[in-house]
């Protein structure tokens, strides 16, 4: 767990510490799995209470960084119940598709790659994959 003293360190140093620590990624993974495991048992559209709870996000921007674990906890506690559940084949709104597990896992991996796909020299893999799907 990232200690509060780390919040006083340089932002770049904190980012690398968070990357090496992995706790926030494990926390996010656990929240994601909890969300998916409960998806079929919840309403497709969020309840009025869940939507009202979004008021918690109406706050002034902090002067200092918050604890990463606290941010994820708040997003999951109030954000997850306020989503429109588009997984599980019960959503008949806009054509958004549904999550395909392999595609979601690939998206997670590519999010960590954090590539800029503007030019081949900036990301050969992204350029290659783009050329494959264009044909």
Image: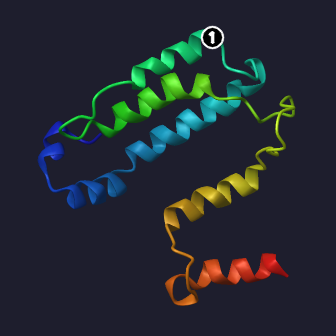
Classed neighbour count for the residue bearing mark 1: other residues with Cα under 10 Å, few (<14), some (14–19), many (≥20): few
Q: Is residue 56 left or right of residue 108?
A: left
Of the pair 82 and 40, the residue shown nearer to us: 82
Of the pair 102 and 94, the residue shown nearer to us: 94
Q: Quadrant of residue 31?
A: top right
Q: Quadrant of residue 17?
A: bottom left
Q: Position of residue 105 (x, y in %)?
A: 66, 55
| Figure coloring | rainbow
On the rendered image, what quadrant is the C terminus found in? bottom right
Above or below, 103 against 129 in this view is above
Name the residue located 26 percent from the left edge and 36 percent from the top edge: 66
On the rendered image, what quadrant is the N terminus found in? top left
Q: Secondary structure at mark 1?
A: helix
Name the residue located 66 percent from the left edge and 13 percent from the top edge: 47
Q: Which residue is mark 1?
A: 48
Name the residue located 23 percent from the left edge and 61 percent from the top edge: 12
Name the residue located 60 percent from the left edge and 22 percent from the top edge: 81
Above or below, 58 against 108 in this view is above
For the image, the number of numbered tags is: 1
Which residue is situated farthest in the top direction here? 49
Q: Position of residue 14 (x, y in %)?
A: 24, 54
Q: Is residue 3 left or right of residue 39?
A: left
Above or below, 121 against 13 in this view is below
Q: Position of residue 83 (x, y in %)?
A: 64, 29
């Amino acid at each position: 767990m990232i200690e509060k003293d780390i919040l006083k360190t340089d932002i770049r140093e904190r980012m690398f510490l968070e990357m090496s620590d992995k706790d926030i990624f494990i926390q996010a993974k656990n929240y994601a799995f909890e969300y998916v495991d409960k998806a079929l048992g919840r309403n497709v559209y969020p309840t009025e209470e869940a939507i009202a709870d979004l008021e918690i996000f109406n706050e002034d921007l902090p002067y200092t960084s918050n604890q990463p674990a606290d941010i994820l906890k708040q997003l999951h506690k109030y954000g997850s119940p306020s989503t429109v559940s588009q997984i599980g084949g019960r959503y008949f709104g806009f054509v958004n598709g549904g999550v395909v597990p392999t595609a979601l896992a690939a998206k997670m991996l590519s999010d960590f790659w954090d590539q800029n796909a503007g030019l081949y020299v900036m990301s050969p893999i992204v350029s290659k994959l783009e050329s494959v799907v264009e044909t």
